[in-house]
């Protein structure tokens, strides 16, 4: 039975509205009811679970709302489910390992909800104006989240992220202004049919630069290492897993406007330079969160390679996003469990972990091998589908760069595994009974294994959603 479009749209929009109400509840209820001061995290998890129930099977059509500003389709349902899942997992980690002072817990979850609403709007945006507004709704709360602990590294991370983010936003709005003067409509569908003059190309390049900043493509990645290292670890997990997805989706829509030409050549170089630079920079890192930051930049490059695969590439990107998110959330959760200082654990702090906490070390090894692309874990299939589409479209040289850099990445991913299994512990690992954070870790470890061994169901969902890019 085909779902009714009107009831589908009403149900889908109820999800973000519920998150908005939950954000207000997390912020305001603890101020008036002392008994609720320790419950914003539980409110957040409950709101996410209820919001997921509003996401139903979408009709095989694309609904255009508000004159094309918002697009509802199987693609938006897929991406909204992804955002809600990441939000829920981040909330669970934050309950187990608080990311904010006790007096700021309500503000923390309020900002987390508002960032998620901005991200949901961004991935469903149908025009550049909506995309820019959603980008700001996403970015401003994340700037504050980076410094929510008010520690020196956190405040430094928030300041650098804000300053560079303002620069990226300025480029984006300048590009939108140029395109608004040249095109009667700024919907992605209308832009695809237009003729790109030199001035229009300048506008597109400014917009692409702004969203490349959010995706952390080189040379727009400068904020990533400091922001991930200084931000609270649950916030870094959210930034790595979810925030990147919004930039990837909009960049794909901008890439798809052109059939080739200078814009595609620029994307080619962005993908190649990102993969090379990030992997080479990661080799010398000693901090776990900083290593994961450069890993995040490298995976943005791999997803940019998938852009050249056409429809197969779109499917690969949609499969890649949740697979990468599971490994990233899992790895940052391990960092949260082990961290003692403000900047997270050093790689040497993981020495001897396999002997002290074998299940935790096994899960971390699974995340590292998935990010490296080792079969049968899901990360291997994500890279395979991303690179296969680009090869089929004749971009073999770009794929060779991606494969070589993926081989280089084995060194620093193995460095973490070697420390856990082959080096004696410098100190004594304190044994803790498994808790909520460990539950998230083991769930993510099972996810990267099952999404690889049984990749067909997730790939089928990605294929259905990719038809509406």
Image: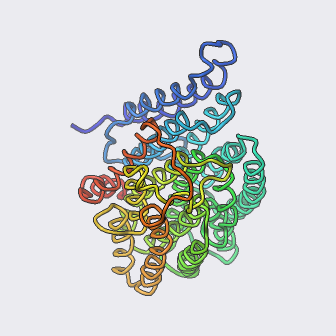
Residue 371 coordinates in the image, percent (x, y): 43, 64
Quarter of image, res 145:
top right
Residue 440 coordinates in the image, percent (x, y): 42, 42
Which residue is pictured at 60% across the width and 59% down the height? 346
Residue 393 coordinates in the image, percent (x, y): 37, 80
Q: Quadrant of the N terminus?
A: top left
Which residue is pictured at 47% across the width and 37% down the height? 88
Instruction: Decide: is 141 above or below 447.
Output: above
Residue 127 coordinates in the image, percent (x, y): 57, 53
Q: Is residue 440 visible?
A: yes
Instruction: Decide: is 406 above or below 149.
Output: below
Instruction: Decide: is 400 above or below 377.
Output: below
Which residue is pictured at 60% across the width and 38% down the height? 112
Observer-nearest of 247 and 225? 225
Q: Quadrant of the C terminus?
A: bottom left
Quarter of image, res 285:
bottom right
């Amino acid at each position: 039975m085909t779902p009714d479009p009107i009831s589908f749209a009403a149900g889908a929009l109820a999800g973000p509205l519920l998150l908005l109400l939950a954000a207000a509840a997390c912020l305001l209820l603890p101020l008036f009811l002392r008994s609720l001061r320790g419950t914003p995290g539980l409110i957040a998890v409950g709101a996410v679970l209820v919001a997921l129930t509003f996401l139903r099977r979408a009709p095989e059509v694309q609904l255009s709302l508000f004159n094309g500003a918002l697009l509802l389709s199987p693609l938006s349902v897929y991406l909204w489910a992804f955002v809600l899942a990441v939000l829920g997992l981040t909330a669970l980690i934050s309950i187990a390992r608080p990311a904010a002072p006790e007096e700021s817990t309500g503000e923390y979850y309020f900002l987390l909800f508002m960032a998620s609403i901005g991200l949901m709007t961004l991935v469903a945006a149908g025009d550049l104006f909506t995309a820019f507004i959603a980008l700001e709704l996403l970015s401003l709360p994340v700037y504050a989240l980076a410094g929510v602990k008010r520690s020196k590294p956190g405040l430094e991370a928030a300041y650098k992220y804000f300053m560079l983010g303002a620069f990226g936003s300025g480029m984006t709005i300048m590009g939108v202004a140029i395109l608004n003067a040249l095109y009667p409509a700024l919907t992605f569908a209308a832009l695809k049919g237009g003729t790109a003059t030199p001035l229009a190309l300048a506008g597109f390049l400014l917009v692409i630069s702004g969203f490349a900043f959010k995706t952390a493509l080189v040379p727009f990645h400068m904020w990533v290492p400091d922001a991930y290292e200084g931000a609270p670890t649950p916030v870094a997990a959210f930034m790595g897993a979810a925030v990147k997805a919004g930039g990837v989706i909009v960049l794909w829509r901008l890439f798809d406007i052109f059939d080739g030409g200078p814009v595609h050549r620029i994307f080619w170089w962005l993908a190649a330079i990102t993969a090379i630079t990030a992997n080479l920079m990661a080799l010398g890192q000693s901090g776990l969160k900083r290593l994961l930051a450069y890993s995040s930049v490298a995976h943005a490059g791999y997803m940019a390679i998938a852009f050249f695969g056409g429809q197969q590439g779109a499917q690969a990107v949609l499969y890649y996003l949740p697979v990468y998110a599971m490994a990233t959330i899992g790895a940052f959760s391990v960092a949260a469990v082990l961290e003692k200082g403000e900047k997270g654990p050093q790689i040497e702090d993981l020495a001897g972990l396999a002997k002290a906490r074998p299940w935790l070390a096994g899960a971390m090894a699974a995340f590292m091998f998935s990010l490296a692309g080792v079969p049968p874990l899901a990360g291997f299939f994500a890279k395979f589908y991303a690179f296969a589409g680009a090869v089929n479209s004749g971009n073999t040289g770009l794929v060779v760069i991606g494969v070589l850099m993926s081989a280089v990445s084995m060194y620093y991913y193995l460095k973490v595994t070697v420390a856990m299994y082959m080096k004696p512990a410098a100190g004594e690992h304190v044994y803790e009974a498994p808790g909520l954070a460990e539950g998230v870790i083991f769930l993510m470890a099972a996810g990267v294994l099952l999404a690889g061994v049984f990749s067909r169901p997730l790939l089928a969902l990605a294929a259905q959603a990719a038809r509406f890019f």
